[in-house]
Amino acid sequence: MHWFGTKITRDQLRSHRTSVAALLAANALPLLGVLLLGWSTFEIVALYWFENVVIGVINVLKMVTCTPDPDQVDLQKLIKSGDAVERQLAAKQAEALVENPWLAHGAKFFFVPFFIVHYGMFCLVHGVFVVVLLGGDGPFGDGPFAAGPRASLDSLLNFNLLVAAAALAGSHLYSFFKNYLAGGEFRRTMLPVLMVQPYGRIVVLHVAIVLGAFVTLMLGSPILLLAILVIGKTLLDLSLHLAQHQDATAAEPGLGDLDAPTTAPAGD
């Protein structure tokens, strides 16, 4: 079956069943918050913004522990492009990796701080956007910031919301240990790939979430629409999670003939 353009097979679900179960369980808590605790649209979107921060922190851990193995890295699949310039760069990266494996570790001194600054600014701007549009007393605001900073902190730091935030963080941490470390993904990827990897996921997720939040607010934040928003986010999150890990199960080991004038495999 296909969800949001991603082909999901039973083999994928079976091979990632524990991380999928953790993802679904963690995403079930916001749904319960909407149905049973009356969480507002702002609280839901703020919770998902926090999840962005968690994804960034874990991506830093991925970059620090990344140890590409020339016998396992498939740069043709990682680049996902038949562009001649990119293929030439891939060939140079492969050659450097074979000649000096420690080069990948030295590059961390540039890539990791750069990612922290760039991604941190991205999350800061996104957080301000969420607070200004959804958290105040503006036309879309239903959040606590209109009542003052003390009320806002009391609302966002309530126990139930913190439990949901911890569950989402735990889900991503579990996937990091299970798929990335224990599954050997840290040997099949490279720093430039990891540096840009989170952006596609969070942009797709949060454009959908924010647009859905606006529609929900304009209709008075009915519980049904909020529940649909959470369920839609969960299904999209699941499809992106499986898409991110499917190359690891499908890729052929080795760098391959990067000088050959071939194009990227269809569907990548």
Image (tube, rainbow, N blue to C red):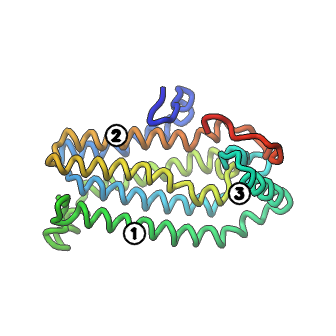
Q: Which residue is nearer to you in this view: 257 or 72?
A: 257
Q: Which residue is drawn at 35% across and 54% down?
A: 48
Q: Does dot 1 land on a helix, a strand or a loop?
A: helix
Q: Is residue 100 left or right of residue 36?
A: right
Q: How much space separates mark 3 and mark 1, taking CA atoms?
A: 30 Å
What is the three-letter code of the residue carrying label 2? Answer: Gly
Whole-percent x, y for residue 117 in the image: 51, 72
Location of residue 82 with respect to 11 vertically, above or below: below
Residue 29 percent location from the top left of the image: 30, 45
- Residue annotated with mark 1: 124
Q: Residues within 10 Å of mark 3 (few under 14, many from 20)?
A: many
User: For the residues carrying marks 3 and 1, which lies nearer the camera in this image?
Assistant: 1
Q: Residue at x 80, y 47 (%)?
A: 258
Alpha-carbon span between mark 1 and mark 2: 25 Å
Q: What residue sits right under mark 2 in the picture?
A: 232
In the rendered view, does 242 fall on the left or right side of 220? Answer: right
In the rendered structure, are the residues bearing label 3 and label 2 in contact, judged by CB atoms less than 8 Å apart?
A: no
* Label of residue 67 in the image: 3
Q: How far apart are marks 3 and 2 (CA)?
A: 35 Å
Label 2 crowding class (10 Å Cα cut-off): few <14, some 14-19, many 20+? some
Q: Quadrant of the C terminus?
A: top right
Question: Residue 237, position in %: x, y?
Answer: 43, 43
